[in-house]
Each structure stands twice: as structure tokens, then as C-alpha cells.
Amino acid sequence: MQSYRTKIFEIALQLLVERQVDAVLGFRRGTIPMMSQPILISSPDEVDQLHWDSFCSSNLANYLPRRKDRVAVFAKGCDSRNIILQILENQIKREQLYIIGVPCQGMVDRRKVLAALDGREPADVSERNGMIRVSGWNFKENFSRDEYLQENCAICTHRNPVIYDELAAEPTNEQREVDRYGDIHALEAMNDDDRWQHFEEILTPCIRCYACRNACPMCYCPTCFVDESTPQWLGKSIDPIDTRTFHFLRAFHLAGRCTDCGNCERACPMGIKVRQLTKKLEKDIKQLYAYEAGLSLDEPPPLDTYRPDDPQEFIR
Ligand code: SF4
Ligand code: SF4
Ligand code: SF4
């Protein structure tokens, strides 16, 4: 990660000094351990605030829609795929962007590390040679990065940026043998009643804070359907029907557009596994349309296109 940091400083400094971009969108170290914060800098003097570590999980594509300036953005594999989708959906223009690709080795799940600390308060974190060292009052603990990855990162098959102007490091090895859909196969094997009950249990703690929606780089509508009042599509309460409607409709809006970046699940204060809904649709879209979201600027999502030979079973 140290070599990443050095390279990231160099690239950002050059872009700003040469005025190739108006701003650089990256990360700075968070104010609490294991939290890196998105930051937008516009002066070479601010470059030393940039940071990169295994907790730079946020998908920076979330900050791009409707920007008017020319901006450099650091992009992991998932970020780059969401950038492609946003370009395809006219949320940002390719020529506005200088994409600094960051080959990714997976991001560490802060919640898993905190659980392993079992109530001990982390005061500092560092990393070296694939190990995360967390220290606090009277303790130092080492964790293997690979054993504490976020669930989506552990099964990610597109860690290298798919679009970039410059790479910050050599491409990383892609994971080819992972089973992306183990949990979805288990859901599909349930009978309807059990599956309904499963989602009832998952969604019951939802407080409708919409953090999952706000964190999603593909949820950029100026007025979300949940906020519409004429017509009002659903109520504002945490009535179970309204809550289910929100989640099911949001998932359908993400069909063929979700990159499984995990931003939604990370943002949820209730620990709700919202990716189970989007991942089921990801699997269906892959099977039905041989399409994975955000891999090519020449391929818009299937629900944005019409082909006479599209499968039509869903209509019947
Ligand atoms: S989803 Fe893939 S590219 Fe994105 S942070 Fe995780 S491992 Fe990296
Ligand atoms: S639904 Fe979640 S996992 Fe999918 S793109 Fe949005 S934030 Fe990422
Ligand atoms: S972030 Fe969690 S609690 Fe908030 S609306 Fe989404 S699923 Fe519900």
C-alpha cells in the first residue's frame, strides 16, 4: 500500500500542477481508525492529504453525477465499472474524467475487525505485507487482510479497473475460481414460503434511513421514487409493505446496473444484507442476457436496450 500511496501522490500532484484537471477525487485518512474518507482537492498544496489503504472502500463514482468540471478520480475495479455505467447513462462525460486506475486487492471489512476486537477500542491501524496491525490501550493485534475482506471483495472477479487513463500499479491477479452466487443458490433452493420468510427477517430491522440508496453510485435520480409525492408511490413509514416495496423496487432499478461494490451494505446502520436482492438480479441478468454491468462503454445495460431476440418469458 505504501507504493500505491507514493504513486497516487505523484499522479495527483502532476495533474494539478499542470492544470490538466480542476480537481482530484480521492481519499484521506479518516478521523477514526479503519475509516478512509472521500476528499476532493483542487490545489497542489492539498496533495499531501491524499491517502490509500485497505479501508478505501467507498465507491468514488458516487460523487461524479452531474459534475461540470474536469476531475481526476481514483478508481478500483468496481468504481471504474460504475463510471462506465454513469457515462453510458449520461451522468458524466468521458472527456471530463481523468481516471487513475487502482488495481485492487480487496478492501478490509472494518466491522469484522471490530467484532474480532471484542469491545477493545482501536486507536491506530497500519498495514504491511498483507497484515493489518490494530493497536489500542494495552493491546496490539495482527489480522490477515485476506481473512477479513468485505464479503463482496472476497468474491470479486473484476478487481482491475476496466477503464483508466493511467494505472497506479501493476494489474493484480483476478480471482477466477470463486463462486459468486453460493448464497443466491441457497435462496433459490428454498420454497416460496421459506424464501419470503427469509426476506421478512432480513428486512424487518430496516429503519428506512435510505443510507443504502444514498451510498449507491447508480441511485442518482434527482427525485427518488420514494420521495415522490405526486403520485406518492409508497408511504413514509416503516410499515412492512412500504419497506418491502422500497427494497424490491430499488433492487429492480439496479438490475443490470449493480457492480456489487458493496457501498449500500457498508452504509447500512442496521447491518441489512441488501446485496442479496441485487446479487440475485445480477445472476439472472448474467444468465438471461450474458451481461455483466459496466465492463464496456459499447454495451449499455440490457434493460436500456431492445433486441428482437431478447428472452420474453417474464411477460407471460
Ligand atoms: S468489489 Fe472488487 S474492485 Fe471493488 S473494492 Fe472489492 S475487490 Fe476491489
Ligand atoms: S446496489 Fe449496492 S452494490 Fe450495487 S452498485 Fe449500488 S451500492 Fe454498489
Ligand atoms: S441503509 Fe439499511 S436501514 Fe437504511 S434504508 Fe437501507 S436497508 Fe434500511
Image (cartoon, rainbow, N blue to C red):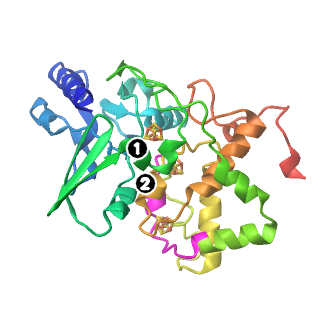
Residue at the left extreme, as displayed: 45
**Label 1, ligand 2: CB separation under 8 Å:** yes
48 w.r.t. 12: above or below: below
User: Which residue matches tag 2?
Assistant: 215
226 w.r.t. 292: above or below: below
Q: Secondary structure at mark 2?
A: helix
| Distance between the alpha carbons at the discs numbered 2 and 1 | 8 Å
- Magenta segment includes 92: no
Note whether residue 307 is visible. yes
Q: Left or right? Give the position of 122 relative to 175.
A: left
Tell me the kind of residue under disc 2.
Ala
Which residue occupies 51% across, 47% down?
152
- From the top left corner, tell me how far across and down residue 28 is, in percent: 21, 44
Ligand 1's quadrant is: top left
User: Which residue matches tag 1?
Assistant: 59
Sequence-earlier tag: 2 or 1? 1
Mark 2 crowdedness (10 Å alpha carbons): few <14, some 14-19, many ≥20: many
Q: Nearer the viewer, residue 148 or 240?
A: 148
Note whether residue 218 is visible. no
- From the top left corner, tell me how far across and down residue 197 is, in percent: 70, 73
Which residue occupies 63% across, 35% down?
292
- Magenta segment includes 211: yes
- From the top left corner, tell me how far across and down residue 201 is, in percent: 62, 74
Tell me which segment is drawn in magenta: 202-218
